[in-house]
Amino acid sequence: MLAFFILSTVFTFGQTTKYVNPFIGTSNGGNTFPGAVVPWGMVSVSPHNCSGCPSGYHYGEKHFYGVGHTHLSGTGCAELGSIIVTVTKGKIKTDPEDYKQSYSNEKAEAGFYSVHLDSANVTLEASATTHCGFIKIISDCDQTINILIDAGRSLAITGGGEVNILSGAVQQGYNISGGFCGEENREEVYFYTEFSSESEKNGIWNGENVSDKKQDSVVDSSIGSWNIFNINAGDSLLIKTGISYVSTANARLNLGTEIPGWDFNRIRTDAQQMWERT
């Protein structure tokens, strides 16, 4: 009997997460999100397709705006939703209504999310650790893409923040979030981001001003970085981001501790196994 129990346990381990559907609760007022998160994780890399929704997402909405790294689930009011990353093409546009795009082939599993961005001609995959997000961009064709990191917006307010481009592959800063249910609460969400390759060009936008500046900050206005990459068909660009509510130094420490390398599949597998053990 004991041997049968052990064999049954071994056989069933790793099989339960396939029954999880993260899209449950993302419509009809559930206000949950389908993005990648681990048990009790501070970071959740989740899509935004509904700017007025508490979690940034409502199943079936037509347009993709980006993925944020912090979210609330099941609340009646919007909050958090930063740091927002998206992929565009052509002229740099900084207003989400100008760069929104259609999407298809959504997939969500425990600790993993993926979607095809139709205008950008890429597939975006995301996974997470407790304090970090990991994004993989896979190109459909040889092309030039823009990676936008919006540090000024959250789901409730455009509170501003700071961006500091340290190199073509590294940047850091913070977002000013808050405004839960119209309240005056504010908090700073710090980030430290690394790309797997150097960008061809980069710079910062502040409000409506797009420049090649490498550092800037603002309050109560939009701010973020634009980054241009050349990518071949089938190739991937990896983006990993550490998050902290304390400092950029702590965000960098979180990233170095939890995602020291560039093995996206390992992070995805680790996230799934964490859910299996929960």
Image (cartoon, rainbow, N blue to C red):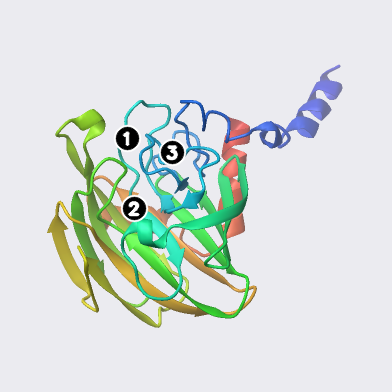
- How packed mark 3 is, by other alpha carbons closer than 10 Å (few <14, some 14-19, many 20 or more), is some
Tag on residue 46?
Answer: none
Q: Describe residue 75's horizontal placement relative to residue 184 as left or right.
A: right
The local secondary structure at tag 2 comes to: loop
Rendered view: 88 above or below 1: below
Assign the C terminus to one quadrant of the image: top right
Rendered view: 153 above or below 26: below
Check disc 2 and report the residue beneath it: 83
Residue 276, image x and y in percent? 63, 34
Who is closer to the viewer here, 258 or 61? 61
Q: Residue at x 35, y 72 (%)?
A: 92
Tag on residue 78?
Answer: 1
Looking at the rendered structure, the kind of residue marked 1 is: Ala
Tell me how far mark 3 sits from mark 2, CA to CA. 15 Å
Check disc 3 and report the residue beneath it: 41
Looking at the rendered structure, the kind of residue marked 3 is: Gly
N-terminal of the pair, mark 3 or mark 2, is: 3
Q: Describe residue 255's horizontal placement relative to residue 108 as left or right.
A: left
The local secondary structure at tag 3 comes to: loop
The local secondary structure at tag 1 comes to: loop
The answer to whether one can see residue 258 in this image is: no
Tell me how far mark 1 sits from mark 2, CA to CA. 15 Å
Rendered view: 84 above or below 164: above
- How packed mark 1 is, by other alpha carbons closer than 10 Å (few <14, some 14-19, many 20 or more), is many
